[in-house]
């Protein structure tokens, strides 16, 4: 599933999504004193996401990946920096201007159980974005939802079931269907595969790949599983303690990592394989 | 589950007699013949007839029992008119006796009023008061708690501090102070309504705190975040996602609050601070017990107090059952 | 120390809030103490007006409040219209009686609740615990009013106990021993009533607090070390459970005050309760405000004491200061 990186593809020069110097800080106040502690979630992050490709963001937990993802998905506000979608800086827009643009970037969460309201039916969940964006009539929305269900591999006859009645893999499909409802160009997957077993992981990966090919979607895929990353990502950015320490195409990264942290990460992946190799010998 | 069901049935059983309201007389009516204390003529209803109570009481307490006049107990009699639920006029009562005998299932009070009927009517008033006040409190609680929990920040801080103020003070004192504010010379209905409003308004703090907790945790859930990612407004999020999570808490709160408020109303009226004559709140039924003479000679006046106990048992059983029910529902 | 200072400040603000609240509420009502008088055709409007201005009832609200606030600081709580005497000494006597009653009951209730709660927690799930639980629940469901009335009934019917009041008629003539005995006899029923009314929730909370602590790992470790059970309960579990219990103490004061109000009226104990009820009925403004403030003060002081106790006993609160 590896493909040539974008930089070598003459058709696509411009990144669809450009993140520049993004920072996010939290200020905590100690309960009984006046001191303020500044905590940096991430600093000076710059990323480029090209159309139709997958950028993987890797790093250990707590490195600020999720926070970054939420900022890019416009669910949180960063403290500084720019996020440009097709050249337009999203952070300077006000609420009304931002409203229609929200359709372009959608997020898929790690745990589908918490991302889906257990009291909603499947149809309602998928149709919700359409409802919020005031698209179509009730029956139109429902029709679209059923359509999407089919596209992600769910039986449309299940439209009235609640999320609890689906398996983990199916719930994630639901989440994907919902994310696709508005026809976004960018999907952000925050460890979307981490809660799934290996079989489901491959299935969902395949689904995502098909969708990407069919709709020319761009994925920002956050993961800590380097093995998976090596399978599906075109480019990789490595995050360490809130900063991007290395960003390259997948092939180049795995072949010749520069940053010591990257090397450590890769080493830990390889060692499992080599151990297995040794044990079978 | 069974407990919940049986208690609900008991409730219905309670309410049905109101419609029939075995009414011999209208409650506000003090008969001109100042009948004094009669013993419960109803003890004879094993065979359903009663003796004219006046025969036994007015002369000497004993011996006149074998009076010639026996008045049979009838079912579904036509009696004085009343209105079912205040709307539909009717004249049918569940049971009664022919005039001029009276049937006093629970005895009568100093004015000759049938305690049983007063108990039933009093139930309407006291239970209604409790119910309305509880709904009022919970509604306020939703409003304040929802806003505090959802928006957080300084608004949350202020609201919760205010709530602490209300919670920390002994509620009875607050209620009294509020009651003192009400003019003493307005119509009884107005007193009733004002009383309920005051009770309801004062009690917003506890449900508010609970609802705030639910709102706080609900707004952090990923599906709320996702909806926000689609551009949902705060109003939408509150309405569609946060509020439904509170339903469970709401229900249990109401079932817990209703008995508390019923008790509050009864207590207030007992002390003379609630609804006044001639509205037959349960508290009014018990007021006369403060007099020594009543307690020592007229034991049946204590009956309403005793009957209250199983009522409250039922209330709390329902509340417990509901809590159990909601514990098993996955979040 | 700063923690305590904040708590004190908080309490003062609370009291201020309460005073404003009660004052405001009383002003909202149309009419005042003299309204019934003005309805009487035999009393001229002029007389009523003079009475009103004498008592300062004709001045606007903020001025009256300010006036009242000033006098409070001087120790003067205003005048009771009904009794014709200053409020402060009136309240003082009543307050003393109420304190006697509630203090005794509070002490007794906690003295009973703690062992009972610990014992129930220790025997959780066993028959004795369940039986205890049933008793507690039944007591809980019985409305306070019914409970008190039952006590009154018992007193009247059996004649074993005095049916009201704090002292018998010939009190002053009794010897010291006789006085104590008389007081005790009169105290008995009210205290029983209050204790029965407030005991169940206490026991419940103590039991659940203890259970929560008993489930924690360090208790298991202590047991594994072979420390005898009663030591585990008393020297290990209880001190940790003390934190929520001390907070509970503060809340129990509020409950006790509410219950005592009702009890005093039912059993004719000459405390703040009956005074308040009568004052409300008569719209004796300053008495009502004074009584409400008094109860608020009781509460606040109680909570402050609880906070101080917490501060002294729980090292976690102290360390928050240092950081």
Image (tube, helix red, strand yellow):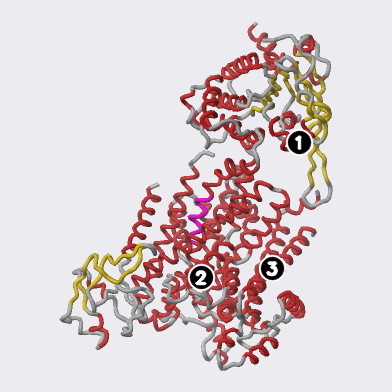
Q: Which residue is mark 2?
A: B190
Decide whether residue C207 is among the magenta residues.
no
Question: Which segment is the magenta one?
Answer: B250-259
Decide: is A59 above or below C76: above
How many residues crowd mark 1 within 10 Å: few (<14), some (14–19), many (20+)?
some
> In the rendered image, which quarter is residue C67 located in?
bottom right
As helix, strand or loop, the secondary structure at mark 1 comes to loop
- Find residue B143 and report its horizontal and vertical position in percent: 60, 53
Decide: is A20 above or below C302: above
Alpha-carbon distance for marks 1 and 2?
Answer: 53 Å
Q: Chain of mark 2?
A: B
Q: Which residue is mark 3?
A: C301
Report whether A246 appears left or right of B169. Answer: right
Decide: is B298 above or below A72: below
Q: Which residue is mark 1?
A: A77
**Residue farthest along the front direction in this orientation:** A137
Front: mark 1 or 2: 2
């Amino acid at each position: 599933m590896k493909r040539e990186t974008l930089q070598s593809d003459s058709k696509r020069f411009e990144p669809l999504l450009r993140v520049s110097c993004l920072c996010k800080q939290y200020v905590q106040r100690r309960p009984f004193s006046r001191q303020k502690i500044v905590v940096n979630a991430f600093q000076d992050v710059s990323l480029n996401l090209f159309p139709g490709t997958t950028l993987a963001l890797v790093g250990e937990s707590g490195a600020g990946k999720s926070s970054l993802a939420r900022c890019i998905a416009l669910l949180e506000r960063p403290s500084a920096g720019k996020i440009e979608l097709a050249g337009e800086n999203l952070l300077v827009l006000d609420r009304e201007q931002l409203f229609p643009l929200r359709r372009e970037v959608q997020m898929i969460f790690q745990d589908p159980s918490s991302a889906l309201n257990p009291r909603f039916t499947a149809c309602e969940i998928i149709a919700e974005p359409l409802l919020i964006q005031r698209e179509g009539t009730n029956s139109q929305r429902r029709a679209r939802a059923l359509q999407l269900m089919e596209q992600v591999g769910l039986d449309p006859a299940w439209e009235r079931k609640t999320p609890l009645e689906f398996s983990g893999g199916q719930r994630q499909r639901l989440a994907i269907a919902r994310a696709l409802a508005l026809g976004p160009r960018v999907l952000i997957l925050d460890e979307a595969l981490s809660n799934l077993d290996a079989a489901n992981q491959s299935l969902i990966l395949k689904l995502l790949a098909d969708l990407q090919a069919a709709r020319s979607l761009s994925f920002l895929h956050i993961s800590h599983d380097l093995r998976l990353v090596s399978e599906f990502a075109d480019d990789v950015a490595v995050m360490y303690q809130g900063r991007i320490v290395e960003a390259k195409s997948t092939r180049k990264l795995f072949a010749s990592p520069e940053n010591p942290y990257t090397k450590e990460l890769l080493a830990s992946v390889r060692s499992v394989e080599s151990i297995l190799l040794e044990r079978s010998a | 589950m069974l407990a919940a069901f049986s208690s609900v049935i008991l409730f219905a059983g309670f309410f049905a007699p109101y419609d029939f309201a075995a009414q011999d007389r209208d409650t506000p009516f003090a008969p001109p013949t100042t009948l004094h204390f009669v013993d419960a003529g109803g003890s004879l209803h094993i065979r359903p007839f009663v003796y004219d109570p006046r025969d036994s009481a007015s002369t000497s307490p004993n011996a006149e029992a074998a009076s010639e006049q026996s008045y049979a107990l009838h079912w579904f009699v036509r009696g004085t008119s009343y209105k079912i639920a205040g709307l539909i006029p009717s004249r049918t009562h569940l049971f009664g006796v022919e005039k001029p005998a009276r049937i006093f299932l629970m005895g009568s009070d100093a004015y000759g009023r049938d305690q049983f009927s007063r108990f039933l009517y009093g139930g309407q008033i006291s239970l209604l008061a409790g119910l309305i006040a509880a709904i009022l409190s919970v509604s306020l609680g939703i409003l304040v708690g929802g806003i505090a929990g959802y928006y957080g920040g300084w608004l949350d801080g202020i609201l919760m501090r205010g709530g602490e103020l209300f919670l920390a003070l002994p509620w009875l004192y607050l209620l009294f102070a509020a009651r003192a504010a009400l003019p003493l010379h307005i119509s009884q209905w107005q007193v009733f309504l004002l009383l309920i409003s005051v009770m309801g308004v004062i009690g917003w703090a506890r449900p508010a705190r609970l609802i705030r907790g639910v709102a706080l945790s609900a707004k952090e859930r990923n599906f709320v975040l996702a909806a926000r990612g689609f551009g949902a407004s705060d109003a939408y999020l509150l309405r569609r996602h946060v509020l439904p999570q509170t339903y469970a808490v709401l229900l249990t709160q109401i079932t817990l609050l209703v008995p508390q408020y019923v008790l509050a109303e009864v207590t207030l009226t007992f002390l003379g601070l609630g609804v006044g004559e001639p509205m037959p709140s349960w508290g009014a039924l018990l007021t006369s017990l403060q007099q020594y003479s009543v307690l020592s000679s007229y034991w049946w006046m204590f009956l309403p107090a005793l009957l209250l106990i199983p009522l409250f048992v039922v209330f709390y059983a329902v509340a417990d059952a509901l809590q159990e029910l909601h514990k098993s529902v996955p979040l | 120390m700063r923690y305590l200072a904040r708590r004190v400040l908080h309490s003062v603000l609370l009291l201020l809030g309460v005073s404003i609240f009660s004052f405001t509420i009383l002003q909202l009502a149309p009419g005042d103490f003299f309204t019934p008088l003005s309805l009487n055709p035999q009393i001229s409007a002029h007389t009523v007006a003079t009475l009103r201005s004498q008592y300062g009832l004709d001045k606007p609200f903020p001025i009256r409040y300010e006036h009242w606030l000033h006098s409070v600081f001087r120790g003067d709580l205003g005048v009771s219209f009904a009794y014709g005497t200053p409020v402060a000494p009136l309240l003082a006597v009543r307050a003393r009686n109420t304190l006697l009653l509630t203090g005794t009951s509070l002490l007794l209730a906690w003295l009973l609740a703690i062992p009972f709660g610990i014992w129930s927690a220790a025997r959780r799930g066993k028959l004795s615990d369940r039986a205890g639980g049933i008793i507690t629940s039944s007591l809980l469901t019985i409305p306070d009013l019914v409970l008190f009335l039952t006590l009154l009934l018992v007193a009247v019917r059996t004649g074993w106990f005095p049916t009201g009041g704090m002292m018998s008629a010939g009190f002053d003539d009794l010897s010291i021993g006789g006085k104590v005995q008389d007081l005790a006899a009169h105290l008995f029923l009210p205290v029983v009533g209050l204790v029965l009314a407030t005991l169940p929730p206490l026991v419940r909370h103590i039991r659940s607090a203890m259970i929560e602590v008993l489930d924690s790992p360090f208790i298991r470790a202590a047991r594994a070390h072979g420390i005898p059970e009663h030591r585990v309960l008393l020297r290990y579990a209880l001190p940790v459970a003390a934190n929520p219990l001390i907070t509970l103490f503060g809340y129990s004061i509020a409950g006790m005050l509410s219950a005592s109000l009702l009890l005093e009226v039912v059993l004719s104990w000459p405390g703040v309760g009956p005074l308040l009820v009568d004052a409300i009925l008569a719209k004796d403004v300053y008495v009502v405000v004074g009584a409400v403030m008094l109860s608020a003060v009781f509460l606040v002081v109680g909570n402050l004491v609880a906070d101080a106790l917490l501060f002294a006993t729980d090292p976690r609160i102290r360390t928050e200061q240092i950081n």
